[in-house]
Image: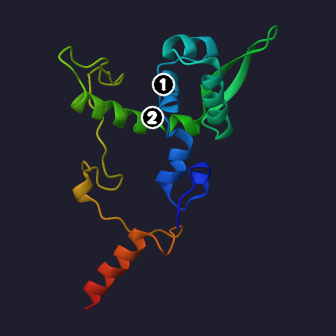
Amino acid sequence: MLMKWDALEEEPCSVARTVAVIGDRWSLLVLRECFLRIRRFDDFQASLGITRHLLADRLKKLVRFGVLRKIPYQEAPKRYEYILTQKGLDLYPIIMSIVHWGNVHMVDSRGRPMLHEHKTCKKMFDPVMVCSECGEPLSAKAVHVHPGPGARKSSPVHAKAQERAKRVAD
């Protein structure tokens, strides 16, 4: 079955559905700005150097998917702020994972462009992903994937799980 780029949000795949929302560079950079507390159209445009048309399109998409909420702050002319919803705030670990990867693999001789301080302990930190059950750090090699109830029966994950189950049964 062939995935259609303009219908990714309908795919039975969490990655594809997420890519439908944040899978282009401008949407990710708009989100970065939101987490840096940029909220107004002109401020996004000044910070990103993006065309008005492209920025309006990305903001509209993020509002349509419920990642941002559009709130008026001025009546004449009508102007809006874009505020992260809970759904948008839940993207923070994704953005921080991208930041961490960039800090590890894409930093030049000047060093990291931004440092992150945890307000509670006042220390600079690197984000890590941990198991929600035991608290251990996660890596790709330490995780097995199993099909969930929403999986497509013809997916590679489903086929591998069936193959693994057959080997165990033999």
Q: Quadrant of residue 126?
A: top left
Give how far across and how far down residue 58 sits, in percent: 61, 30
> In screen coordinates, is 145 left or right of 109?
right
Q: Is mark 2 on a helix, strand or loop?
A: helix
Q: Which of 166 and 73 is in front in this view?
A: 166
Label 1 near label 2: C-beta < 8 Å? yes
Residue underneath mark 1: 35
Near mark 1 (Cα within 10 A), the count class, few <14, some 14-19 or many ≥20, is: some
Residue at image position (34%, 56%) is 133
Q: Which of 89 and 104 is in front in this view?
A: 104
Q: Nearer the viewer, residue 65 or 53?
A: 53
Query: Which of the two labelled residues, at mark 2 and mark 1, occupies the earlier sequence position?
Result: 1
Residue at the outermost top position = 76
> In screen coordinates, is 109 left or right of 88?
left
In the image, residue 122 sits, relative to residue 69, either above or below, namely above
Residue at image position (35%, 65%) is 145
Q: In which quarter of the image is residue 42?
A: top right
Residue at image position (79%, 14%) is 78
Position of the C terminus, as image quadrant, is bottom left
Q: In which quarter of the image is residue 85?
A: top right
Residue at the outermost right position = 76
Instruction: Give the residue type at disc 1.
Output: Phe
Question: Distance from label 2 to label 1 (Cα)?
Answer: 8 Å
Give how far across and how far down residue 18 sits, in percent: 51, 47
Residue underneath mark 2: 92
Residue at the outermost bottom position = 170
Residue at image position (61%, 34%) is 62
Give how far across and how far down residue 81 sits, in percent: 66, 19
Instruction: Give the residue type at disc 2.
Output: Tyr
Numbered disc total: 2
In the image, residue 76 sits, relative to residue 128, either above or below, namely above
